Image: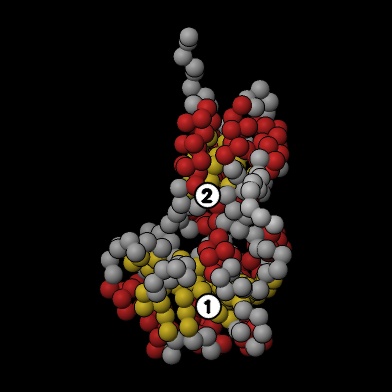
Amino acid sequence: MSERAAIAPRALVAGHADFAVGLVSAVQQITGRGDVFVTLSGRDLSGADIEAAVRRVVQERGITVVFTDLQAGSCTMAARKALRDHADHVLVVGANLPMLIDFVFADQVPATEAARHALERGRSAIALMGGRA
Amino acid sequence: MTLILNRIDDRLIHGQVVVGWGQPFDVRFIVLVDDEVARSDWEQELYRMGTPPDMEVFFYTLDAAVGALPAYRDDARPGILLTGDVASMLRLVTDASVRDVNIGGIHHRPDRRQRLRYVFLSPGEEALLKQMVERGAAVSARDVPASNPVDLRALLESETVAR
């Protein structure tokens, strides 16, 4: 079996504390393809610094998709500002593991299209089990 | 109820504010004082989208906030006052009788020295914070309700200590 070539990152995952690193490490463990993502933590950074970091990743890595954790979070705010002038880029808020795994395997379609599909997968993967009404 | 928190935070509205303080205190409105945001419909929409539907956000320039704050203090609902910098909060201490100041987040800049994990201050900002105390305000740092407040004296004596 031949070795798989390194994958160019296709998306940025950003969020509070170790959210991004944690999610992507889980993606890596399950799929072996954590290198699809670049991670960013907003920990101890100002909003302006987070925004600058997002801009840098988007420009230098050619990334068109950003996943964040919380709608009110500073990474989401910063990403919205950084992507304001990129109408062809997408931001997905409320990222979860099923969503990122789906994104990883949709590598035959453009990243923004993969993100839209991943959003639906992530949404449908949420379930409540057990308990009493 | 009234304004339960008068906070300096250079991120303005974000997770700690909306969730960390907002949920346990059932915060129903935020008064955001920032000249740049007050003049930008796009930025206002950005911050509104970051808050839950039952939490209102009101935007003011610094000058306009001075006259507007008494009405929010009399509001029956719990609310949060936010500024993005120390100088703006000093103005509200001086001209709008703010008496309790929370330093929630002032992050790294080359001219600032780290005092806490989430507080970096320039010499000029330290002087402004001392002026707040001289004018009768209680000033302390606290990022979220679950952490212990650090009063200004202890804050200015601390050196790059993670708390």
What is the x, y in percent for residue A114?
Answer: 67, 32
What is the x, y in percent for residue B40?
Answer: 68, 64
Label number found at residue B6: 1
| Residue lying at the far top of the rendered structure | A1
Q: Are marks 2 and 1 in contact (CB under 8 Å)?
A: no
Q: Quadrant of the N terminus of chain B?
A: bottom right
Q: Judge from the rendering whether residue A60 lies leftward or rightward of residue A116; answer left or right.
A: left
Q: Quadrant of the C terminus of chain B?
A: bottom left
What is the x, y in percent for residue B137?
Answer: 44, 86
| Residue lying at the far front of the rendered structure | A132
Chain letter for mark 1, please: B
**On screen, B83 above or below A4?**
below
Indicate the colouring scheme: secondary structure
**On screen, B8 above or below A49?**
below
Label number found at residue A15: 2
Kind of residue at disc 2: Gly
**On screen, B145 above or below A72?**
below
Q: Residue at x 67, y 28 (%)?
A: A110
| Residue B137, visible in the rendered structure | yes
Foreground residue, B148 or A53?
A: B148
For the residues marked 2 and 1, what is the alpha-carbon distance in whole angstroms? 25 Å
Tell me where residue A116 sits by quadrant.
top right
Q: Residue at x 43, y 90 (%)?
A: B136
Q: Residue at x 48, y 31 (%)?
A: A28
Chain letter for mark 2, please: A
Q: SS at mark 2?
A: strand
Tell me if mark 2 has few (under 14), some (14-19) or many (20+) residues whose alpha carbon lies within 10 angstroms of its own. Answer: many
Kind of residue at disc 1: Asn
